[in-house]
Amino acid sequence: MEKDLTANDLATLAPALGADAEQVAAEVKAGISQLIRYADGSRIVARVEYDAAGGELVIVAGAGRDAPGKVAALVEQATRRGWSVRFHTKRPALGRMLARLGFTESERVYRYGGQ
């Protein structure tokens, strides 16, 4: 398990992390989130959260090739463990890809001021 995001990791994930890069890097360093490095150069940051309903795999950020294949593999692993999967994105195209994998939109966030 990687504990630090390298400069290459940050560069690859930059479009997905946006202004949250420092926070996500700190979560990886603290072991709250984990970095998955793929041989093709892709990267995914994920964490597992638990509540009364059980575990949930949260895909925090991802960048690289074959997103549908990589997400489908993560969903399969989560399903075997009895976990649900949550994926946050601001990108409509990624939302459409996730819908093809069986994801449904569950919330929208609206913000005023600040960021």
Image: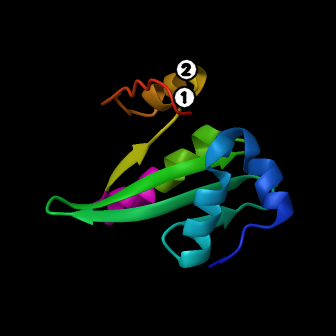
On the image, the x and y values in percent for residue 22 come to 66, 58
Picture colour scheme: rainbow
Magenta stretch: give its range: 75-83
Residue 51 forms part of the magenta stretch: no
Q: Label 1, secondary structure: give it.
A: loop
Residue 80 forms part of the magenta stretch: yes
Residue drawn at x 62%, y 75% is 29
Evaluate if marks 2 and 1 touch, with contact meaning CB atoms under 8 Å apart: no
Residue drawn at x 65%, y 64% is 25
Would you name the residue on which mark 2 appears?
92
Q: Label 2, secondary structure: give it.
A: helix
Residue drawn at x 53%, y 51% is 60
Seen as rendered, the residue at the extreme left is 52
Residue type, mark 1 in image:
Lys
Determine whether 40 is above or below 37 in the image.
above
Would you name the residue on which mark 1 appears?
90
How crowded pointer 1 is (Cα within 10 Å; few <14, some 14-19, many 20+) is rated as few
On the image, the x and y values in percent for residue 47 come to 46, 63
| Majority secondary structure in the magenta region | helix
Residue drawn at x 52%, y 59% is 46
On the image, the x and y values in percent for residue 78 come to 38, 59
Left or right? Give the position of 30 relative to 81.
right
Q: Quadrant of the C terminus?
A: top right
Left or right? Give the position of 7 relative to 18.
right
Determine whether 29 is above or below 5 in the image.
below
On the image, the x and y values in percent for residue 52 come to 14, 63
Q: Tell me the quarter of the picture where residue 68 sits.
A: top right
